[in-house]
Amino acid sequence: MPNAFDVLLTDLAARPGPVLTWYSTSGERIDLTGRVFAQWIAKCSHLLTDLDLQPGERVLVDLGPDWRAPLVWFAAWRNGLTVTDGAPASAVVARADRRTAMTGVVTGDALVVVPVASLARRVDPLPTGATDFAAAVPAFPDQPAPAADLSGPALVLAGRSWTGTEVLASSTRRGRELVGPEASARDLLAIWSGGGSVVWHDGLDATTVARVTETESVG
């Protein structure tokens, strides 16, 4: 049975326009076309393979409302892994300013640290034994390995499990939609699976949200 997330990713990669536009309160803006989105996911997929994570294992993703979070979600799903927001987990991918998930869950190479700044080339300081996302990911190929089977749970949020079919069940036609920091993986996936594109922010004020809404042709 085809990996449902890989089918969606193939569709996203073929779209000519942006599939993810991200705004930060620090003033950063990241805009990813479907092709570039898929290339980043391929690189992240190779990173997870390099960590020797096996299909069926769980990856705790603690990145908050950050544009790199969906890259790790899709990479994990391509590899047959389950994405979770809590322990137990075989690996943790955490932003450098989010320490909760980095303490006492996993150790060694199974901890991947993502820098706060989007374009940072390295994490400094890097916890002992951890993998530096910014330094490692760009070196991996843009082309993915074949997708793994994903027969078990795909997403575990607050202890509840969903399969790929359940997560991608929404088929309502979607457009270009603006979502804030409260948006979950399921919210973003509903937009993408409905044919839409995501404009995501990590907590902009109302004035900036209004400007972004107009600039990005949301609605």
Image (tube, grey):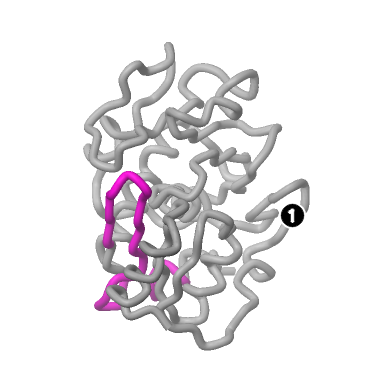
Horizontal side, residue 171 vs residue 213: left or right: right
Side (left or right) of 161 relative to 154: right
**Viewer-closest of 114 and 27:** 27
User: Height in image: 201 above or below 4?
Assistant: above
Whether the magenta-drawn stretch holds residue 29 is answered as yes
Which residue lies at the image location 37% right of the left edge and 48% below the top edge? 25
Residue occupying image coordinates x 29% and y 32%: 136
Whether residue 193 is situated above or below residue 108 in the rendered picture: below
Q: Which residues are magenta?
A: 8-31
Q: Quadrant of residue 119?
A: top left
Q: Which residue is mark 1?
A: 161
Residue 53: percent from left, percent from top: 52, 35
Residue 12 lies, in percent from the top left, at 37, 72
Residue at (60, 27) in percent of width and height: 100
Of helix, strand and loop, which one carries label 1?
Answer: strand
Which residue sits at x=54%, y=64%?
3
Find residue 110 and report its horizontal and vertical position in percent.
50, 26
Residue 89, image x and y in percent? 64, 33
Q: How many circles with numbers are drawn on the protein? A: 1
